[in-house]
Image (spheres, rainbow, N blue to C red):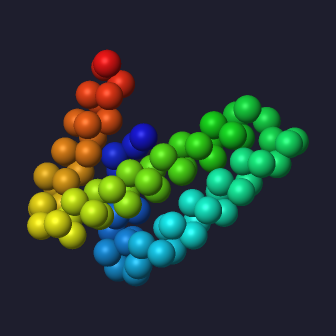
Amino acid sequence: MKLPVIKQLTEFIEANDQDYVIEAVEVLEALTEVPSLKDEELDVIGELISNMYGALEVNKLVKSGMPKKEALNSFMQRVLGSIDK
């Protein structure tokens, strides 16, 4: 996951609507079913999906009243904490 990408996607959600990101995730998930995709291509698609889900989670935290910077940091701390375990 890349914090700058999640931040950009979060700003996109604020300016538009989270439904665009949800639909994009659905499209990317459908693409993972293509049998001819190489592992590297699947990795890129997976990274995009992870960043989009991260942005949706950050957006949820912001909607609950948390400042955006704090929501981004909190989310990344949770991700890093789960990796360390």
Q: Residue at x 19, y 54 (%)?
A: 71
> Which quarter of the rendering shows the N terminus?
top left
- Residue closest to the eye, 76 or 30: 30
Position of 27 relative to 2 (above/below): below
Position of 54 relative to 11 (above/below): above
> Which quarter of the rendering shows the C terminus?
top left
Residue 7 found in image quarter: bottom left
Q: Is residue 53 left or right of residue 36?
A: left
Q: Residue at x 23, y 51 (%)?
A: 72
- Residue closest to the eye, 68 or 27: 27
- Image location (x, y in percent) of residue 57: 33, 56
Q: Of all residues shown, which one is farthest toward the right?
A: 36
Task: For residue 56, say whether it is visible.
Answer: yes
Residue 64 found in image quarter: bottom left
- Image location (x, y in percent) of residue 9: 40, 62
Q: Is residue 17 left or right of residue 32?
A: left
- Image location (x, y in percent) of residue 17: 41, 78
Q: Of all residues shown, which one is farthest toward the top?
A: 85
Q: Is residue 4 left or right of residue 46?
A: left
Q: Residue at x 82, y 48 (%)?
A: 34
Q: Residue at x 66, y 63 (%)?
A: 27
Position of 21 relative to 30 (above/below): below
- Image location (x, y in percent) of residue 43: 63, 37
Position of 58 relative to 16 (above/below): above
Task: For residue 8, say whether it is visible.
Answer: no
